[in-house]
Amino acid sequence: MKLHFLGAVRQVTGSRYCLEAAGLRLLIDYGMFQERSFLERNWEPCPLPPEQVDFLLLTHSHLDHAGLIPKLVREGFQHPILATPASAEVAKILLLDSGRIHEEDARYKKKRHEREGRRGPHPEIPLYTAEEATAVFPLLQETPYNERVHLNEHVWVRFHDAGHILGSAMIEIGLRENGRERRVVFSGDIGQWDKPIVRDPSLFEQADYLVMESTYGDRDHEDHGEVTDRLEAIINDTVERGGNVVIPTFAIERAQELMYYLSRLVREDRIPHLLIFLDSPMAVNVTDVFRQHPECMDEEAQALFQSGQSPFAFPGMQLVRSVDESKAINRIKGSCIIMAGSGMCTGGRIKHHLVNNIERPESTIMFVGYQAIGTLGRRIVDGEEEVRILGETRQVKAKVVQIHGMSAHADKEELLRWLSALKNHPKKIFVVHGEAESAKSFGRYLQEKTGWDVIVPEFKDEVVLD
Ligand SMILES: [Zn+2]
């Protein structure tokens, strides 16, 4: 039995692992590298011959876990991709959107390089196209939670709730090799307990080998008070000033979580009944997937739907797909709330809404997620007085606020909680999916606390198990 670490080691993106055991070669996730310094890796061919991989098991449909699958298929992978039903649906939306963005980026780069009379480090071709993304769809094999699926006579897999985003899973693999039974668990991204809509992360009583994430392995989330209280105060304050609340938002999970909080505030009459727009075709499509998959929701969310109090349909809530509808938002007199992508303001319709609001002191720009260095969102959050949007310099006069407490990842204590149900002494724990310092610090902490054999692998490490 052998494990290959092909990404998300000492970094948070590019999740890719390969488990070779009992006559099978399994890939677990095939994600895109998103840190600027690792982008190069996206262009390298698959480190293993793709036609010799038997199955791809997908933990969840975020780009850093699924984003390179179209490229893998183009390179020759033609075997089943196991994913939960909701994950499979979200993957289609995500990969199609990603293919379109790669095409647009390539066109834009080509134009820019021509204009500047230079050549970039790569040919100006898309990493993959929208059409190549659709070639993934027939390979997706919907795999329900909590059921053993046999891959051959010696190997089974079972998907468990991860509590991270809709459809997200932890993957348990049971196998028999050389007369020995072994359990291997891949944590995927571990969510937080008691988050709205999705169920809590699953716990495991038995595992011989664990591959676990450590995004927040070096810190505990601060208690920033109730998200709803903060939202209520910010919205009421902005309405009093006569401005709009503009929220750059991620299409998967964060948008739906925001709708959940806003629906509560509206139904409890804690904010005035305003028009609330979700202006992102991708987020609207993902919201449809949520509606179709109540089995992924926690009891509280299921009860809301059953009582007719959908968190996605309440007075004032408007789901916007068309460009005309999107433009019409700017003609509204009086205050409204606008959620639009992208979450870090790097593209999409949010830019137009920023143009219309960022120079108005009465409006509020509200950030609800992490803003990476170098993005427009980060510059606004960092308090820059002027920013360039759509080719023009704009003064930042709107109020800028950030709401914490909506992270989709477990913190240090919750990561430990995830291991707390184990009844056996695992042979090895591999700490992955965390920046180098975070992964190493969590690895040390875990080793001190438990005395277990903890390893923080490096890129392309191969480890023989047993
Ligand atoms: Zn994720």
Image (spheres, helix red, strand yellow):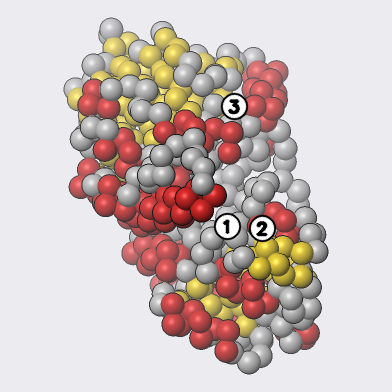
Q: Nearer the viewer, mark 2 or mark 3?
A: 2
Foreground disc of the pair 1, 3: 1
> Within 10 angstroms of label 1, few (less than 14), some, or many (20 or more) residues?
some
Where is residue 48? Give x, y as percent.
33, 22
Q: Which amino acid, by three-letter code, is at mark 2?
A: Gly
Residue that badge 3 annotates: 10
Q: Which residue is mark 2?
A: 377
Residue 461 can be seen, yes or no: yes
Q: Is residue 346 above or below residue 365?
A: above
Label count reads: 3
Q: Residue at x 42, y 19 (%)?
A: 4
Whether residue 333 is situated above or below residue 297 in the rendered picture? below
Q: Contact, CB < 8 Å: mark 1 with mark 2?
A: yes
Q: Residue 45, image x and y in percent?
A: 36, 28
In the picture, which quadrant includes the C terminus? top left
Mark 1 and mark 2 lie on one chain; the one further toward the N terminus is 1
Circle 1 sits on which residue? 346
Earlier-in-chain disc, 2 versus 3: 3
Q: CA distance from mark 1 to mark 3?
A: 25 Å
Q: Which mark is residue 75?
A: none
Query: The residue under label 3 is which amino acid type?
Result: Arg
Q: Earlier in the sequence, mark 1 or mark 3?
A: 3
Q: Quadrant of residue 436?
A: top right
Q: Residue at x 23, y 37 (%)?
A: 80
Please name whichever residue, 56 or 211, is drawn nearer the observer in this view of the structure: 56
